[in-house]
Image (cartoon, grey):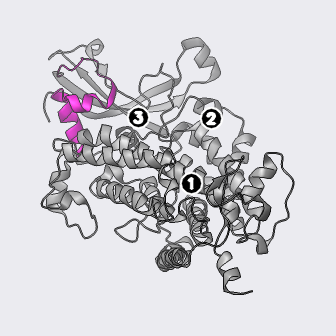
Amino acid sequence: MDWADWLLLLDAHDYTIAREVIMRGVAAVFLLAFLSSFCQFPALLGERGLLPAPVFIRRTSGRWSPSLFRWRRTPYSDRLLRVVCVVGMVLAASVVAGVVQLGPAWTPIPVFLAMWGLYLSIVSIGQRFYGFGWESMLLESGFIVGFLGSHEVAPPLLILLFLRWLMFRLEFGAGMIKMRGDQSWRDLTAMNYHHQTQPMPNPLSRWAHQKPEWWHKSETLGSHIIQLVMPWLLFLPQPIASCAACLIIGSQLALVITGNYAWLNWLTIILAFSGISDSFLRWVGGGPFPSWGWEHWGEATGGNAVGAGASAADGSVAVSGASPLWWLILTAGVFVVLAVLSRRPLLNLFSAHQLMNASYNRWHLVNAYGAFGSMSQERREVIIEGTLSPDPEEADWHAFEFKGKPGDVSRRPRQFAPYHLRLDWMMWFLALGDCGDEWFLRLLRKILAGDPGVRRLLRVDPFDGRAPALIRVRVFDYRFATKAEKRETGQWWVREELGTLVAPRGHL
């Protein structure tokens, strides 16, 4: 093999469909993330939010939370935050529409780095409301995906391999944290509870919860197989890698059908395409079964090439010849830097003290992931109620209903994912015992004051903007109604009061 043949091995000509799915998909998630921030950040973290970002910026250093909002010439304001979100949405839409991919090889890089930098600026000052693993996951994938290049070059093999390494950390990390964290995962009973106790059930969660025990044990066992075995297969030759990726996608679709996990599942599905080749997709679509092997990983698609940057009928974009040397050096350099940053996340995967959803640098690159290391077996709900009467009877109390979290027992759970309802998620954590947090006290104060920003985050304000005379907070145990209870009462939930968290008050 001469040097040109070696360069060809760094190109992944058989992954052009994967590149389109990944680039457009990650951009679509960015668009949704910026939209979520545009709608929710001011009320949660704005100038008059529950945890005001300007106060956080003054009290902290940018060393571990870099943000353009820390620049002296651009101090935080809700207006600037919305401008940042709009710019991010425009950039994301340009990739979703395929405009950016039509330029030179390097064109996607500044666009994705701009989205990464803008969203990093938001996450870095987002405090607890942005402390979710999928925020870091979006930032990491957003940083790397631009280096997949435009239609002018073949997808770089090293970048695709790093995306598979991201998938490995995500899936295998989640599997290991489960096995280490909770007996219910080891004795296969975790899914007996999960559909009912998950942060935000959806319309099919009750149906899934009421399946027989053998079904739930199969779900748990299947989760272990998918998360502990399939990630290793992503690094094997085709079609093994494609089959493993498809099984991961299938498991994520099951989670989409039965829950609300913001964009976590959809982003995982998108990134799993890094393991699926064009040849495999053509075969699934009815094409001939190709011969695969290690030697085909970097080869061009031969007769399938229809010219540089041209689109085939199946949606692939064939590129003939090797990519430019400068491009291969650039992408190899990025891969090396990210590989160096992978040391601590790699050690974490096999550590007895494994961290879940941890970032090892302020840029949120090469993170540790994981979810549900411990399984809640009971569901607690914090219910905020108010009254206009200064001397109320029990009938005078009315609940403030949230958009996603359970409240009204007669209301069917809704589907919101991939949109992220941040306040609803934090209320779930609150019910797990985090009841003394500053943000919750401020939420109660703003409800007492009839704050319009907070009202927009709620589904039902029983007083149409009027400030209540008193509020109280009660805690309930919730469970799904059985089939018989549902037929008799029409209720989706059955609840039992456990106690009072905040006694009736007119001020806090």
Camera-nearest residue between 252 and 104? 104
Tag 2 residue: 209
Look at the image and tell me whether residue 188 can be seen: no
The answer to the question of whether label 1 and label 3 lie on touching residues, with beta carbons closer than 8 A, is no
User: Quick one: label 2, few (<14), some, or many (20+) residues within 10 Å?
Assistant: many
Whole-percent x, y for residue 247 in the image: 71, 52
How far from the left and from the top, in percent, is residue 292?
82, 66
Q: Secondary structure at mark 1?
A: helix
SS of the residue at dot 2? helix
Q: Amino acid at mark 3?
A: Glu
Q: What residue is drawn where x is 21% and y is 47%? A: 80
**In terms of sequence position, does the residue under pointer 1 or pointer 3 come before the other?**
1
Residue ID for mark 3: 381
The kind of residue on which mark 1 rests is Ile
Mark nearest the camera among 2 and 1 is 1
**Residue 465 appears in which quarter of the rendering?**
top left
Q: Which residue is mark 1?
A: 22
Q: Nearer the viewer, residue 500 or 108?
A: 108
Q: Residue at x 59, y 62 (%)?
A: 167
Marker disc for residue 292: none
Q: Which residues are magenta?
A: 439-467
What amino acid type should be assigned to the residue bearing mark 2? Answer: His
Compared with 499, 154 (above or below) is: below
Residue 388 vertical placement versus 267 (above, below)? above
- Describe the element under mark 3 as helix, strand or loop: strand
